[in-house]
Image: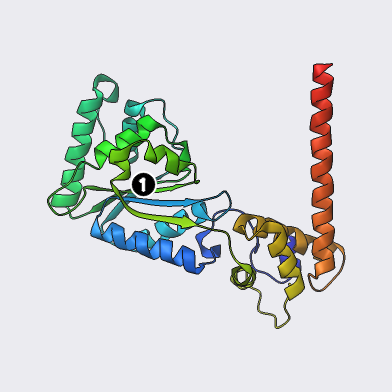
Amino acid sequence: MSYYKILGFDKEPFSTSPDPNFLYMSAEHESALTNTLIELNLKRGLNIILGDIGTGKTTLSRKLIQQMAKRERFLFQIILNPFFEDEKQFMIFLMQNFNIQVDFQSLSLQELRDIFEKFLLERTLEQGNTVIVIIDEAQKLSIQSLETLRMLLNYETNEFKLIQIVLLGQVELYPKILEIPNFYDRINFKFTLYPFNLEDTKNMIAFRLKEAGYNGKMNIFLDEAIKEIYNYTNGYPRRITILCHKSLKKLILDKKYVVDVALVREIIQEEERMGWQKREKILQQNNNYLN
């Protein structure tokens, strides 16, 4: 039996998979999502969401998709690993995702662009759709790929852009964008996600427990334990999730009823000990190699 069923949950409360139903919507996440949806409806073009590793960008992208699926005439695709050898490979990938059937290999890059522009005109002007491309892990985009996106943003009517682009990436994406001034100028909406404060950490834990099916009156995580979790994770959602998962497993193994500060500290001490051992092992391997 899974540990979460022993505790009376219907689902695993602290999975690290990007399930949009388990995304705790802090004020920042709510603002990022709401503003992005507004800009997509207005067809303003380029939207960028930045954040460090573990701030919830990928899960937010799934939440965005969930919301877009409820809206009529939104035609969208998501790119999860945006690494492309050159601009032509990027264009082919885009067109294949939108099910555009042509002889890709025999066509030049400019011909592919022209065909894609025609597709955008048909979908937006004739059929009334909003065509959207969402790119997760956007920091992996090369300068060439960013240049391709810049070219696509040139496709517009007098009233709106023919394609809407949402980039979600780590903060190192921003210096890349600054290298292309005429791409930077096309940014319509930019938002940066930051780690949670203590209150959001507490609310996130409570939200995920409830979403997993917990309806007990007793708090599983005591306030002092939550404070310890916050201090150790610095408020990063992914780190909070991992530490809470380990806390619940230890709760069962130790046959306890609540996660208290002592339990959390035991896990942290073990994490730090294992981290030290790992570093020592790497150093030893390096020394053996040098000798």
Is 149 placed above or below 265 here? above
The quadrant the N terminus occupies is: bottom right
Identify the residue at horizontal 32%, vertical 31% (top origin): 92
The quadrant the C terminus occupies is: top right
241 or 116, which is in the foreground? 241
Identify the coloring.
rainbow
At numbered mark 1, what does the secondary structure look like: helix, strand or loop?
A: strand
172 or 222, which is in the foreground? 172
Would residue 222 be seen by someone viewing this image from the given angle? no
Q: Which residue is mark 1?
A: 77
Residue 147 placement, left or right of 249: left
Is 227 placed above or below 140 here? below
Q: Which residue in the rendered view is the most extreme toward the top?
A: 291
38 or 210, which is in the foreground? 38
Q: Residue 94, percent across and down?
A: 33, 37
Identify the residue at horizontal 36%, vertical 46% (top origin): 77
Residue 99, by quadrant, is top left
Identify the residue at horizontal 21%, vertical 47% (top origin): 162
Q: Residues within 10 Å of mark 1 (few under 14, many from 20)?
A: some
Q: Residue 74, percent across and down?
A: 29, 56
Q: Residue 83, percent across and down?
A: 45, 33
Identify the residue at horizontal 31%, vertical 32% (top origin): 91
Residue 228 placement, left or right of 37: right
Q: Residue 81, percent across and down?
A: 47, 38
Would residue 193 be seen by someone viewing this image from the given angle? yes
Residue 252 placement, left or right of 177: right
Residue 6, by quadrant, is bottom right
111 or 106, which is in the foreground? 111
Mark 1 belongs to which amino acid? Gln
Q: Which residue in the rendered view is the most extreme toward the right?
A: 254
Is 291 placed above or below 169 here? above
Is 83 placed above or below 124 here? above
